[in-house]
Image: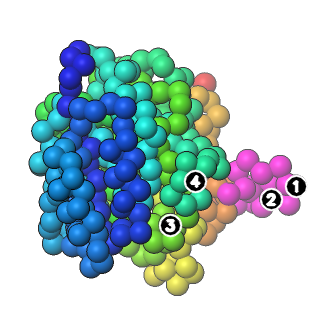
Amino acid sequence: MSTQSLISVIVPCYNVEQYLDKAIESVVGQTYTNWECILVNDGSKDSTQSIAEKWAAQDQRIKLINQKNKGLSGARNTGLKHATGDYIYFFDSDDLIAPVTLSNLFNLVDDDIDIVFGKCAMTKGQSDEITGYLDHDLSVLEKHYNNDNLLLAKVIEESLICVAWNRLYKAEFLFKNKLTFMEGLLHEDELWFFETLFYANAIILNDTPTYFYNVANVNSISNNFGKRNLESYLTTLNHINSNYYENNALKGNKEAVSVYLTHLKIKTLIHCFYKTPSDVQESMTPDVKNTFQNINPKRNNQVLNTDLELRHYFFKVVKSLEIKDILAFLRYYKSKSISRSFKKQFILLKAKFKNKKQDRVINKSYIK
């Protein structure tokens, strides 16, 4: 592997005048120097463009692209279209990267590996003062091969944060598989995460924090949940189901996709539905129920460990109930509280009674 490989750092920018200087400084300060930084000004209404122009004039490696607002997915896709590097690295403009980020990740590059995952630290504000870490639970400095698409199951068993940034992607891998971000979608990283893991030959994780994620940005999408957030999760579920599970022309392990769909249904309720205001929950409940009912992938072989397979099985058992009951069951599932355990069992009995009345049978025979 050539030590001169070019890395394209793609930075979407939208109304980030208070963050952009520090973000670009952290790119310019990289110990790995063969990079291009593509700043995509996504229709900003503040001084983001003038700040970006200043940096582009100072360093020829920095390129500025101005466009009408297309959202985060559209800005990233524009960056991909203009990228000329051998590797792609996404970086959000309200965060920071460590001086050794690109060199640290590039040192793990191998012909077999399509994605190098960097460890992500959390900070309060745009700084390198670490308050915690995002999920990075797979064994580090070890190749994880995607035999039979089972990386999808691996990241459910050993959690890996679902984001696009702080990963070094082989550009050829992205372009060969025509991987782009779905535009108009919030939480676009959910679909991107699934698709990159579905197609990857192998991945590897580093062992040191290379990214400082600013959790204090109140304008971040992760801090605000509404109707569009929930709609985006449902769109993602439908897309994976129709394009990867029901699409018989696409080769792949349907069991692994099935497991991921159930995982994402559970995540939709706990991570999104639960955090939305009550009026949004009420208006969106019919859509959530319809989506869940229409996506029913079959299971015949055990893919996850027994504990997780049982969680998925019980989720399917209670899926016939109202959303509020399903959510309560999931929240109480591992609770050691006597009262919550009682409520969980009551919900389960109610579901079993309803399923029996409707002649609804959920297969459990594959779980050992």
Residue sitting farthest toward the bottom: 279
Q: Is 336 in the magenta?
A: yes
> How far apart, in angstroms, are the residues tagged by discs 3 and 2?
34 Å
Residue type, label 4: Thr
Q: Are marks 2 and 1 in contact (CB under 8 Å)?
A: yes
Against 150, is 75 above or below?
A: below
Q: Which mark is residue 340?
A: 2
Element type where label 2 sits in the image? helix
Q: Which of the pair 343/236 is nearer the observer?
A: 236
Q: Report x, y in % for residue 215.
A: 54, 59
Q: Can I make out residue 67 in this image?
A: yes
Residue at 62 percent of width and 30 percent of height: 306
> How far apart, in angstroms, are the residues tagged by discs 4 and 2?
34 Å
Q: Which of the pair 77/39 is nearer the observer?
A: 39
- Mark 2 neighbour class, 10 Å CA radius: few under 14, some 14 to 19, many 20 or more: some
Element type where label 4 sits in the image? strand
Q: Which mark is residue 123?
A: 4
Q: Which mark is residue 338?
A: 1
